[in-house]
Image (cartoon, rainbow, N blue to C red):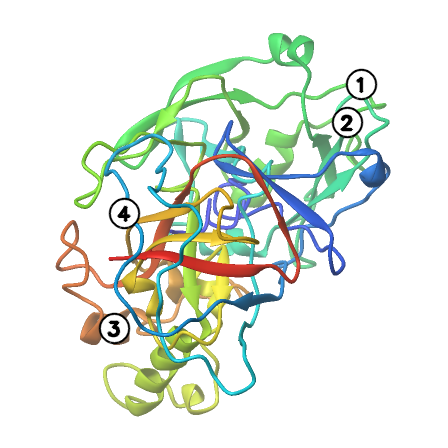
Amino acid sequence: MSSTFSESIIDALRLAGHRFHLGLGDPFTWSSDHLGLSLDTSASATGLTATALAGVFLLFHFAYHRPGKRALSIQPGSANFATKDQTKMVQLVERPPDGSVKVSKILIHPIKHDRKWCIIDAAANKVVTARDTPRMVLIAPHIELDLNSPHGGALVITFPTDAPDGCTEFRVPLNPSPSTLAEWDIIERIGLHASSVDGYIVQRLPEASFQSSNPELTASEILSVYFGKPVHLMYKGPRARPVRTTHAFPDLKATSVFQDMFPLLVLSEESMEDVEREVRERVGQQGVDEHWKEGKVHIRRFRPNIVFEGGGPFAEDNWEVVAIGRPDAPPITLVSKCGRCLLPNVSPDTGIRDAAVPFKMIMKFRTGIDPDAMRTPCVGSNGVPAASGVVSVGDTVFVRKMV
């Protein structure tokens, strides 16, 4: 999964987006309308301000049980990935003496508004990504919730301190109303990889709902200054965008917004440790610079949604269905491995692309993993949630079916 407004603003104002920094126990809600996550908007959440940071980390406990045969099955291609027995779990490894194995954190970025925005080249009508424009990763999006406002809050965009003159912070409506969208131009065919998607060009609104220190400029015009060419800030249009089918799920039925491929990406801390070991072993070889003796291959380079610890390196390779919070929670099906391009070579802190790390390393030991991409290095597993549900800090992750 490439970075999209992480990879596209930031990687495409596909906003890797809306990563909410919430306190312990604050709820997230799976939203089946876009197969992402949405914040709980109950009365207790009124007035909450959520800030999209580099990532939100939710501590989870990981459920382990003694080894045994698979207890669950899934019907490939079914829309809801329903299991025959919602109460049993797949057993993975011996339970440790203290009775629990902890997931280090959950980095959730497909929240309700995630990937609903992107930036496109105005001439080509094609999504701009950090693969081609690495400095995109330095644009900082965050969300300010205001449930008393007509648009529910704002998407706020800020730029690095060395950005060109004119790149000033601006806000656009978080949830444009139907009447607002009716006034915006729509582009029916935006190029995104091998597919096309629709989107609205975000227009300037009255000062009450659109604020900028350059009020005479639209969001697209401000972003065009940063990119040095005409670009548009887009908001996802009404047309559903089906995800591609996979080798394991040839009849897969699911949708996404401005994601590269799928709504979720699962990855373990131990997987990153393995990648780092490979990097350190090759310092001075294959273009690996000396600074990697101490440098960290941060997991943010790979843009995962769910980060766990305790299953071992690349444990996610062996999972097919997981549930978060309780065994009968709406399942997340891992439909394929995530094939990797050169995007993880871009530092999320500097916007500079490394010549070798980590792509050359993962080419050495992570190819031949997925039948759909045998020559492509794969890191992490792509996921599709089945339905709505609540995810809270401290929840347990249950592995319900293995590959």
Q: Which residue is mark 3?
A: 360
Q: Residue at x 19, y 45 (%)?
A: 248
Mark 3 or 1 closer to N-term? Answer: 1
In front of the other: 19 or 42: 42
Above or below 193: residue 207: above
Q: Along the polypeptide, which appears first: circle 4 or circle 3?
A: 4
Residue 64 image offset from top left, x and y in percent: 44, 71
Q: Which sits earlier in the primary sequence, circle 3 or circle 2? A: 2
Q: Amino acid at mark 3?
A: Lys
Q: Which numbered disc covers residue 73?
A: 4
- Measuring from the top left, give residue 169's x and y in whole percent: 74, 43
Q: Nearer the viewer, mark 4 or mark 3?
A: 4
Amino acid type at circle 1 is: Pro
Quadrant of res 284: bottom left
Give the secondary structure at mark 3. Answer: helix
- Tell me which amino acid carries mark 4: Ser
Q: Can see residue 130? A: no
Tag 1: Cα neighbours inside 10 Å, few (<14), some, or many (≥20)? few
Give the CA distance from mark 3 to mark 2.
Answer: 44 Å
Question: Residue beneath label 2, please?
Answer: 210
Depth order, front residue of 64/173: 64
Q: Which residue is mark 1?
A: 206
Q: Say which element carries label 2.
A: loop
Spatial distance from mark 4 to mark 3, Cα to Cα?
A: 37 Å
**CB-based contact (under 8 Å), mark 2 and mark 1:** yes
Label 4 vs 2, first from the N-terminus: 4
Find residue 354 and name its label. none
Q: Residue at x 25, y 88 (%)?
A: 285
Marks 4 and 1, Cα distance to the nearest angstrom? 53 Å
